[in-house]
Image (cartoon, grey):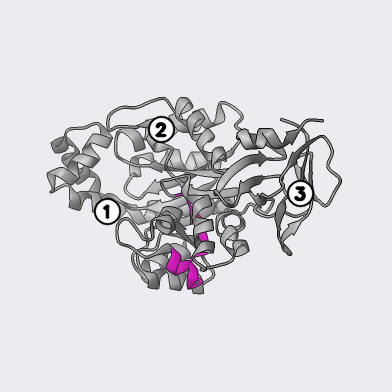
Amino acid sequence: MTERLGITAGRVLLRSDGEQPVDLALEDGCIRVGAAPRGAVLDARGLLVLPGIVDIHGDSFERQIQPRPGIGFTPDIALADTETQLLANGITTAFHGVTLSWEPGLRSLPAWRALLDAMEARRWSCDMRVHLRWEAFNLDALDVALADIEAGRVHLVAFNDHTPGIVRKLGDPVAGAKFSERAGMKLDAFRALASRIAARADEVAPAQDRIAAAARDAGVKLASHDDDTVATRRAFRARGARICEFPMAEEVGQEAQAAGDFVVMGCPNVVRGGSHIGWASAAALVQAGVCNVLSSDYFYPSMLRAAFTLVERGVVDLARAWALVSGNPAAAAGLDDRGEIADGKRGDLIVVDPVERRVVATIVAGRIAWMGAEGARRLSLA
């Protein structure tokens, strides 16, 4: 860790000029383009120097908390391992998609409180933030969510509504077991709980209005998740949600893009060549100019690989591909201090082997936060 760091001889992806062979100096957490390096120096010869990845929707951390149904670990252990994964994959800013649901167990109110407390208990190298995924029918937790938004503990809010889908699937014992096991309940008891929750449908819209108002008052960006129709997208936009996460049909994404919304898709969709549940193709929406933000969704290593995959397929060039995983998500989240390499911007950078698509070093706020063996060989200490 150092307050001064130089990066030399690399191909640097600059905001205005594309890839350039220019040296960088990092001082007091900020970037200085073309300045003489001082302090430790990282030789980036043959490597790319790129803005740090900004992940505005990732829930892979849940697998560290509950690696198997009913088997849980404390959030401090889970977050420590998650941070290592994030940094090793070039993610310098991560919005953890924390679902606050009526379901017991992994997505419950006690789990929400424990995770937020663990995030605030120590200083992390990765800039980890809270993306509240507000489950529409979780009316009993409304006051807690409102208080946490007002207190500044939440950095992004998304409207979720998985309850109707859960209720439909509970008639199938196999599908229902997925939800009951996650909640740590017997299937019959979970069915009864879901039935009671679903009966409060008339209270959902007023609660969403209150969540939206609290987020707007706090200056927190709003998103909607899995919009299935244009009407649904328009309704959430009217509440102030200008981020459309994972539109379920291409026409929904097209309408959102035409209205100037950010349209988010998942990097696993790009890497795998399509949605795992048969929805819109992220790569096709990128090529059509509809999708302008990519997220890790459920797999952190997919972000860097998705950007290079789009370039390899000829969908977009590197500058545009990288904007999908860095500059655009930063803009969507209201973070104008990062997402590009320019004078005065926050020193969030990654050094990448473009042939192997491997992160050599990750730098957060001007400090080395993660480094592999290759990076260590290339680092000269002052």
Q: Which of 318 and 74 is in front in this view?
A: 318
Residue at mark 1 to residue at mark 3: CA–CA distance: 60 Å
Which of the image's four quarters has the C terminus? top right
**Is 296 located above or below residue 182 in the figure?**
below
Residue 265 lies, in percent from the top left, at 44, 59
Q: Which of 196 and 35 is in front in this view?
A: 35
Residue 49 lies, in percent from the top left, at 68, 50
Left/right placement of residue 92 relative to residue 224 reads right
- Name the residue beneath numbered marker 2: 64
The disc placed on residue 9 is 3
Disc 1 packing (10 Å; few <14; some 14–19; many ≥20): few
Tell me if residue 291 is in the magenta stretch: yes
The disc placed on residue 201 is 1
Secondary structure state at the residue bearing disc 1: helix
The quarter holding residue 362 reads: top right
Whichever of labels 2 and 3 marks the residue nearer the N terminus, that label is 3
Q: Nearer the viewer, mark 1 or mark 3?
A: 3
Secondary structure state at the residue bearing disc 3: loop
Q: Nearer the viewer, mark 2 or mark 1?
A: 2
Residue at mark 2 to residue at mark 1: CA–CA distance: 33 Å
Residue 235 lies, in percent from the top left, at 41, 65
